[in-house]
Amino acid sequence: MRLSGNSVATPFARKAQVVVVGTGPGGSTVAKRMAEAGRDVVMIDAGSYISAAEFSQREGEMMRKLYQEAGLRTTDDGSMAMLHGRVVGGSSVVNYLDCFRTPERLLYDWVARFGLPELTPAKMRPRFEKIEEILHVRKLPVENLNLNNDKLRRGTEALGWEGDTFHRNAKDCYGSGFCDLGCSYNAKQSAAITFVPLATTSGATLLTDARVDRVITEAGRAIAVEGTLLDEARQPRGTFRIDADVIVVSGGAIHTPYLLLSSGVDDPSGHLGQNFWTHPGSPVCGWYPGERIANYEGIKQGYYISEFSDVLRGHPTGVLIEGIGAPPGITATIFPGLGWERQEMLRRYNEFSAAGLLLRDTVPGSIAVGKGRPSIRWSLAKADAWRLKEATSRCAEAWLAGGASAVVTGHSRLTMIRSTKELRKLDDVGWGPGEVALFCFHQMGTARMAHSPAVGAVSPTGRMWAYQNLYVADGSLFPTASGVNPQLTIYALSDVVADGILAET
Ligand SMILES: Cc1cc2nc3c(=O)[nH]c(=O)nc-3n(C[C@H](O)[C@H](O)[C@H](O)COP(=O)(O)OP(=O)(O)OC[C@H]3O[C@@H](n4cnc5c(N)ncnc54)[C@H](O)[C@@H]3O)c2cc1C
């Protein structure tokens, strides 16, 4: 059953056995498992349910409907854009479909350092197999690469580096190129069209347009959630309360700690909201004067360079370089230069290829309670800035080897590199706030899983230490940054949490 906050009677009240806050990869996994086990489940999302027919492919309209703060959220210091979804299905609705199983060397690290024996590769494999079947994960054939990604492949192969096409959760994708504005063809197998309907088919209730403002606890138990029902203009129109035997918070790695901290829950670990990992990334573009690259056409993310990944190859730089395409609005916020210089760059937008850097950060930020919204405390650490410079150089080399006449970095001061000799220009440009465009698409780690409260905010089953029935299941669980695109890891860790809930409650 699906209910909307903009039409249910207010105040709305209900009892359930399990309430799940958030319907992204984390929340939808737990909701599905609980409903299939016969529990009475209510899933709640602050976002709306948006069907394929409603994805208009118009950037302004869709950014407002699908993203937190219309996609304009940043870290407190304004240095990094923070993109994440606010819609049924969470960020899986707007993501680029890249699927990586958690790399084995990372799983061994998490098992050893965080005391998580359920996460060995052998125990995780069947979970991944099951999830990949539901999400229809397949490797992209090389002939389906768009020109942008194919240029990146050619450069990578010319240099003898390791790279590959992505595995993607797509069915009958013909490459419309609007992944980040929602898939109008339901080719993207997001949580909204897989795990969420599997949960409702098994009897779960989905309440949309309903923001949970508070988790209510009493004597070591979570007893209810309370919140605000939103009308079509996203204005408050009433209140709701759901009493439940088990409460699962799956609002993503920013909103989960924000909700729990603003509810005043007891966190003996002191880790809640800490260890905020972001995979800071920056665009690096190749310039092919006179050639139509149109990086936004076709399958935007098709090819990646793994040569410099620490989790896949043990390389100290710790970066994945991924082909990417961006819609014009976002591009306009990134492109360097000022005035005429910038206008000229945008006029030539079609001649630029683009790649994004996914840096595995080593110095985390934190999430705290700000004035009515999360406070996102993060800035690029010196050690990570140095690695970002290395990663930018490697990406520039790949574009040049793939035939680009020049490479443009994401620096606000126009930085054009025409040969590998000119890479030294990167020593003279700044990497501080406002000096280089930074993006975060992956939020992780703010309620990390571990064997003891000395190390993490939740137990190996995702349970808050001070409560018998309060769980976390989403990207917050990551002990460290994953170093690869995180969605499959989130589905799999949340599946571990689902087992824990079924065993413990
Ligand atoms: C543009 C973009 C591209 C990406 N590309 C990829 C990719 O190619 N591959 C990949 O692996 N990952 C990708 N990601 C990241 C991936 O999609 C996310 O890591 C993943 O969806 C996070 O899952 P989650 O369950 O932790 O939270 P989310 O998906 O963020 O879901 C959280 C949900 O909780 C809801 N919520 C939050 N607070 C409340 C509240 N108080 N009350 C009610 N509801 C609430 C939100 O509305 C949201 O729907 C991308 C992300 C973005 C933004």
Image (cartoon, helix red, strand yellow):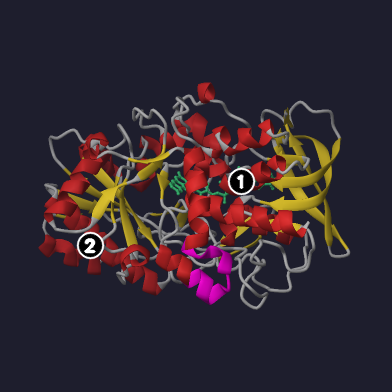
Residue plotted at (70% across, 46% down): 21
Residue 373 screen position, x and y as percent: 65, 53
The kind of secondary structure element at disc 1 is helix
Q: Quadrant of residue 352?
A: top left
Q: Quadrant of the C terminus?
A: bottom right
Q: Is residue 40 visible?
A: yes
Residue 261 screen position, x and y as percent: 72, 61
Other-residue count near label 1 (Cα within 10 Å), few / some / many at <14 / 14–19 / ≥20? many
Q: Nearer the viewer, mark 1 or mark 2?
A: 1
Q: Quadrant of the N terminus?
A: top right
Whether ligand 1 has any atom under 8 Å from the Cβ at mark 1 is answered as no
Q: Is residue 74 visible?
A: no
Name the residue beneath numbered marker 2. 393
Q: Quadrant of residue 44?
A: top right
* Residue type at tag 1: Thr
Q: Which residues are magenta?
A: 109-121
Residue plotted at (25% across, 48% down): 285
The kind of secondary structure element at disc 2 is helix
Residue 475 screen position, x and y as percent: 56, 55
Q: Is residue 76 above or below residue 45?
A: below
Is 118 inside the magenta-drawn segment? yes
Q: In the image, 241: left or right of 310? A: right
Q: Main secondary structure of the magenta part?
A: helix
* Residue type at tag 2: Ser
Whether ligand 1 has any atom under 8 Å from the Cβ at mark 2 is answered as no
Between residues 438 and 480, which one lies in front from this camera angle?
Answer: 480
Q: Is residue 387 above or below residue 247?
A: below
Name the residue beneath numbered marker 1. 29
* First reached walking from the N terminus: tag 1 or tag 2: 1
